[in-house]
Image (cartoon, helix red, strand yellow):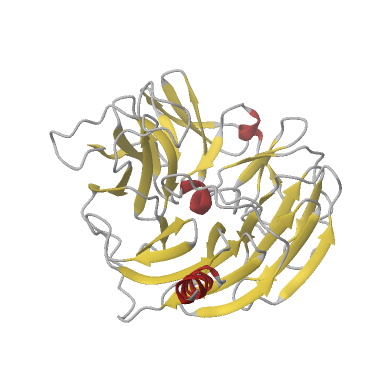
């Protein structure tokens, strides 16, 4: 009887809801731009934070390590573990890391230290769906968007907007039935179905075209998107709250990267002005990966990374995406995050399973490549 009672008590202590926070013990690292090239293989997808830290997702934990240029996973800088709640999504805004959990709790962390800055209760969120790398949770979080200092939580037709730095509720609304799977724009709007909302106020934004809308040029997930195509397949740029017409985005497959509209047709990459005028062309088979202002990143079929000057189309540099010269790089590109100075790429096995839980889905056990660009 005593043994049974002890077992029950131990089980209760282990299984009761818990939250464990470990904060940073060292100063925030300075910005260091590593020598250009691929430098690390890791088995989890990092959300690159201010080009200083790498943030990772697991089923019950969010954590960060540094320095960003480490050649593998490093000692945890800070972490937040919650149980039995599961980590649903992670987004960042300025110095904040905002996490949403399956029990509806939204926790805002100071990304530099890991200290909890605020928390709010919201509707239940989807369970962890990060699979083996955590990439969907940090690079494309479900029902969690950010832009212009506002974090937007969605649950069906319910929209709740929080101030990213304080957690104060800015507004909430019930969206139309067709308002699902929306995106935020760089100019501070939330767009879904046939509706657009100003993120700071929740008020509908007048003068928008008719949906449904297709986002383009989104740096991470469905947040801070730089353009879209409307229901008539007309293209628009979204650096401001009111979108401006961009005829160049009418062409299917065009996007916004490196501060310019760019498209690939056959063996030609073309840079356009918004009015559709061709600015330059670059000859070669390539996939557009994205790029910060002043740099357009292309991936060739042989997995060379090519950087072009987006204003001229001239090549800035080109290198092989392998950590070593002899490394096998015959892989397909999966999910990608591009920051100002760094990039992370999921590498998929050619001819492998499409199931991310399958042992043949990824190229190797350390399937994520980190690159200085």
Q: Quadrant of residue 297?
A: top left
Q: Quadrant of residue 324?
A: top left
Q: Residue furthest left?
A: 326
Residue 9 lies, with reference to residue 175, above or below; the image says below
| Residue 353, percent from left and from top | 43, 26
Against 245, residue 204 (above or below) is below
Where, by quadrant of the figure, is residue 320 drawn?
Answer: top left
Would you say residue 373 is visible in this rendering? no
Is residue 314 among the parts visible in the rendering?
yes
Foreground residue, 239 or 202? 202
From the viewer's side, name the closer residue of 251 and 113.
113
The residue located at (86%, 48%) in the rendering is 176
Q: Residue furthest front?
A: 1
**In the image: residue 212, left or right of residue 112:** right
Q: Which residue corresponds to the image point at 53% horizontal and 72% vertical from the top-left?
A: 12
The percent position of residue 164, horizontal first and vertical second, equals 61, 71
Viewer-closest of 339 and 142: 142
Q: Compared to 143, does 25 lie above or below? A: below
Name, please, the residue furthest toward the top. 266
Measured from the top left, where is residue 317 in percent x and y? 26, 40
């Amino acid at each position: 009887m005593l043994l049974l009672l002890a077992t029950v008590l131990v089980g209760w202590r282990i299984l009761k809801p818990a939250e464990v926070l470990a904060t940073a013990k060292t100063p925030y690292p300075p910005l260091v731009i590593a020598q250009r090239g691929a430098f690390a293989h890791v088995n989890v997808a990092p959300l690159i934070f201010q080009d200083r830290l790498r943030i990772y997702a697991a089923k019950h934990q969010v954590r960060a390590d540094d320095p960003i240029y480490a050649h593998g996973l490093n000692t945890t800088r800070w972490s937040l573990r919650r149980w039995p709640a599961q980590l649903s999504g992670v987004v960042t805004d300025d110095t904040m890391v905002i996490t949403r959990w399956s029990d509806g709790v939204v926790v805002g962390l100071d990304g530099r230290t890991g200290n909890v800055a605020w928390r709010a209760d919201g509707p239940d969120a989807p369970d962890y769906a990060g699979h083996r790398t955590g990439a969907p949770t940090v690079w494309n979080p479900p029902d969690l968007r950010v832009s212009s200092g506002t974090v937007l939580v969605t649950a069906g037709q319910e929209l709740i907007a929080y101030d990213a730095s304080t957690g104060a509720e800015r507004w909430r609304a019930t969206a139309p039935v067709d308002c699902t799977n929306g995106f935020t724009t760089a100019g501070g709007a939330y767009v879904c179905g046939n509706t657009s909302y100003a993120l700071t106020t929740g008020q509908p934004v007048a003068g928008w075209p008719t949906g449904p809308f297709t986002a383009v040029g989104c740096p991470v997930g469905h947040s801070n998107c730089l353009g879209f195509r409307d229901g008539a397949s007309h293209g628009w740029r979204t650096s401001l709250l009111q979108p401006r017409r961009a005829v160049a985005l009418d062409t299917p497959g065009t996007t916004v990267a490196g501060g310019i509209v760019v498209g690939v047709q056959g063996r030609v990459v073309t840079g356009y002005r918004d009015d559709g005028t061709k600015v330059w062309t670059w000859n070669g088979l390539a996939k557009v990966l994205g790029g910060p202002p002043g740099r357009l990143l292309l991936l060739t079929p042989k997995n060379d990374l090519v950087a072009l000057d987006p204003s001229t189309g001239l090549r800035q540099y080109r290198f092989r995406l392998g950590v070593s010269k002899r490394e096998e790089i015959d892989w397909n590109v999966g999910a990608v995050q591009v920051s100002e100075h760094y990039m992370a790429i999921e590498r998929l096995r050619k001819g492998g399973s499409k199931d991310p839980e399958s042992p043949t889905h990824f190229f190797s056990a350390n399937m994520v490549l980190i690159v200085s660009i």
